[in-house]
């Protein structure tokens, strides 16, 4: 018989639920157990648990409702998930662009012509300076 058998009451020592009471619901292996109770139901390292003297009669992999009933008999608090309610959001439609559409090929041709004119300008300026 191990120290962390199913039904053993424990105190969490580490993590977000530290200081809260829990009960072992399932033994995964030598180092890990699944706990439930005043903590979130999750897999926990036994190094993060302090076993208490009390045990509860639970079957292996007991549901949260079964654990809740046993904790209420002992007068202990139970972690209950608070489901969030979301309001329906209004779907927004994309606004259509008011910009006129531009032909990409034509725009590239215009850009190339502008570049050629700019490249030619320094040569013209150089010739003008030489003549003067």
Image (cartoon, rainbow, N blue to C red):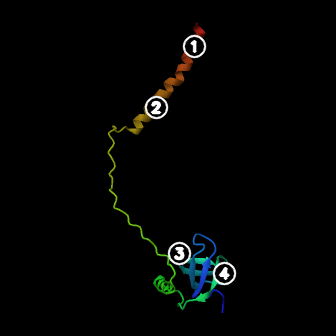
Residue 108 horizontal side relative to residue 21, left or right? left
Badge 3 crowding class, 10 Å Cα cut-off, few under 14, some 14 to 19, many 20 or more, is some
User: Between tags 4 and 2, which lies in front?
Assistant: 4
Residue 35 horizontal side relative to residue 64, left or right? right
Camera-nearest residue between 99 and 19: 19
Camera-nearest residue between 50 and 126: 50
Residue that badge 2 annotates: 111
Which numbered tag is attached to residue 31?
4
Q: From where the camera sits, is residue 110 visible?
A: yes
**How far apart, in angstroms, are the residues tagged by discs 3 and 1?**
84 Å
2 or 3: tag closer to the N-terminus: 3
Circle 2: element type: helix
Circle 3: element type: loop
Residue that badge 3 annotates: 40
4 or 2: tag closer to the N-terminus: 4
**How far apart, in angstroms, are the residues tagged by discs 2 and 3?**
64 Å
4 or 1: tag closer to the N-terminus: 4
**How far apart, in angstroms, are the residues tagged by discs 4 and 3?**
18 Å
- Residue 5 place in picture, x, y as percent: 61, 88
Circle 4: element type: loop
**How far apart, in angstroms, are the residues tagged by discs 4 and 1?**
87 Å
Q: Residue at x 50, y 84 (%)?
A: 67
- Residue 58 place in picture, x, y as percent: 53, 90
Q: Residue at x 58, y 77 (%)?
A: 43
Q: Residue at x 56, y 19 (%)?
A: 122
- Residue 95 place in picture, x, y as percent: 33, 46
**How far apart, in angstroms, are the residues tagged by discs 4 and 2?**
69 Å
- Residue 85 place in picture, x, y as percent: 38, 66
User: On the image, which quarter does residue 10 sit in?
Assistant: bottom right
3 or 1: tag closer to the N-terminus: 3
5 lies above or below 108: below
């Amino acid at each position: 018989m191990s120290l962390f058998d199913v039904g053993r009451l424990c105190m969490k020592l580490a993590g977000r639920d530290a200081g809260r009471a829990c009960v072992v619901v399932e033994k995964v292996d030598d180092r890990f157990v699944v706990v439930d109770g005043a903590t979130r139901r999750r897999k926990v390292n036994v190094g993060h648990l302090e076993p208490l003297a009390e045990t509860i009669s639970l079957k292996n992999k007991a549901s949260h409702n079964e654990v809740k009933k046993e904790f209420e008999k002992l007068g202990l608090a139970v972690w209950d998930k608070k489901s969030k309610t979301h309001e329906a959001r209004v779907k927004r439609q994309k606004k259509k662009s008011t910009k006129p559409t531009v032909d990409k090929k034509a725009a590239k041709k215009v850009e190339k012509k502008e570049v050629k004119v700019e490249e030619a300008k320094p040569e013209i300026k150089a010739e003008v300076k030489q003549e003067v």
